[in-house]
Amino acid sequence: MATLATFFRRFETRAEAPRGPRIETDPYLLRTLPNEDVFFYCKKIDNSRLVREADPRARKECWSTIGAACVMAALLTTILVPKMLGTMEGYRIQELRAEEQRLLDERRVLELEEARLLSPARLQELAQQRQFVAPSPGQVIHLNPKGDGALALNVK
């Protein structure tokens, strides 16, 4: 803070006082620096004995703000959740359609492979390569069509 001494010292640097005799000043004297006359003091303040009083309106305002925020969150949730779920289900449907198309393509490939492997011409060729021959009439055993278990009891 400015003191009276520093306030009046400002007039010493002027060449001529407003009224009165001329004051001799040092021509080599420098101007004062800005805020040179401001002094800061550190004073220790002890607020440990102070007790804050509770504001009765502050508690009510706090709870009303919390309640309003909860209501707004519930409204936003009820508005946005169905839309979000619909979007997610749309993605899931597209994923299932893509999987269905992939499985249909795979099924066509497998059916074509099965038809190629089970063709009579290929089976005849494999039989000739492995030297398979048709069984003679004595080698064929016909099972009992009655299903009474008589064949299982025949022990030779």
Image (cartoon, rainbow, N blue to C red):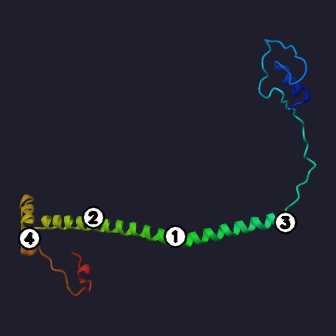
Q: Which residue is mark 1?
A: 81
Residue located 76% across and 66% down the image: 61
- Which label was assigned to residue 47? none
Distance, label 3 to label 2, CA atoms, is 68 Å
- The image quadrant of residue 33 is top right
Q: Nearer the viewer, mark 3 or mark 2?
A: 3
Q: Which residue is mark 2?
A: 102
Marks 4 and 2: in contact by CB < 8 Å?
no
Q: Which residue is mark 3?
A: 56
Instruction: Indicate the position of residue 45 as horizontal and vertical percent values.
Output: 90, 41
What's the amino acid at mark 1?
Val
Q: Nearer the viewer, mark 4 or mark 1?
A: 1
Distance, label 2 to label 4, CA atoms, is 44 Å
- Which label was assigned to residue 135? 4
Residue located 91% across and 26% down the image: 5
Task: Classify 10 Å Cα crowding around label 3: few (below 14), some (14-19), many (20 and above).
Answer: few
